[in-house]
Amino acid sequence: MKAIVVTDQTAGTAGMKLAERPEPQAAINDVRVQVHASGFTWDELSWPSTWIDRLGRDRTPVIPGQELAGVVTALGYGTTGLSVGQRVFGLTDSYRGGTLAEHVAVEARNLTPLPRDVDFAVGASVAMPGLTAWQGLFEHGRLQTGQSILVHGAAGAVGSMVTQLAREAGAYVIGTGRAAHRQTVLDFGAQEFVDLENDALEDVGGVDLAFDVFGGDIAERSAAVIRTGGTLVTIAGPTEARPADGLTIDFVVVSYRAQLSEIIRRVRDGRLRTNIGAVSTLDDAVAAFNRTARRKGKTIICVRP
């Protein structure tokens, strides 16, 4: 099968190439999926889990990518809940990766059925951002109706999902970004917009929750505008920033079938819009990974026409 392969951790994206690899086999509780569309996170070559398995063993050469949508072609021993020929979407374990390829083996519990009226590219585009937003808002942030939330990068793949789900939950949403992103952020449902380059974040006032995707100085400044006892949720890594008498929660997304089902139901109902910024083929995936300009939204690799 064709796949994007990285053979040298020190070379980073310069070590990526399109190559032939053996088709993966479905182990116990796995399914093998013929990938139709996949996605990746821009910094995943810097993750330790990209290069080792859960026992700490080197697994180069690696195939990057966690997000996928496709069709089940084989079941491993003991696999239940899915069947051969079924359309599915979801995430692989970060210690396995492998979705930038024509086939991938995935734990069945990490996937959920993809309705026939939902495009494969849409399924791949909502898996990671949708789960990240859902878990950050409702599991870690414990967002409640009537609360206020500051959403950073609200025009991006994750931020736009956070904005939409928070609005649906009855929150007051303040989105941030660059000046050029103002209308996009408002179109996704934010009631206010803060231009991080020109506006004073400190003028926002007290919010109940902040969802951070940047880290660093932005995380520190965000903690200062959270009301006493509020919560800062971040996916940018550990930070010393803390709201007064509140919590800072740094988390890594995991795949849950029930949450994926809730997300795709909202997509079908028109309550949740995808945010696809660019679409490339597997042949052009190396160039897509080595982007030369900042992009809004999710980059999707269409593996099959």
Image (cartoon, rainbow, N blue to C red):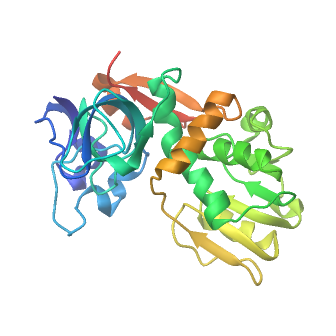
Q: Image quadrant for the N terminus? A: top left
Rendered residue at 59%/46% (across/down)? 158
- Residue 216 percent coordinates (x, y): 60, 66
Q: Is residue 157 visible?
A: no
Rendered residue at 76%/84% (across/down)? 245
Query: 200 or 123, which lies in front?
Result: 123
Query: 81 or 125, which lies in front?
Result: 81
Taking the image as shown, residue 54 lies to the left or right of residue 200, namely left
How many marks are shown on the rendered structure? 0
Query: 271 or 50, which lies in front?
Result: 271
- Residue 31 percent coordinates (x, y): 26, 42
Query: 255 or 159, which lies in front?
Result: 255
Q: Quadrant of residue 33?
A: top left
Q: Quadrant of residue 69?
A: top left
Q: Farthest residue toward the top?
A: 305
- Residue 80 percent coordinates (x, y): 31, 46
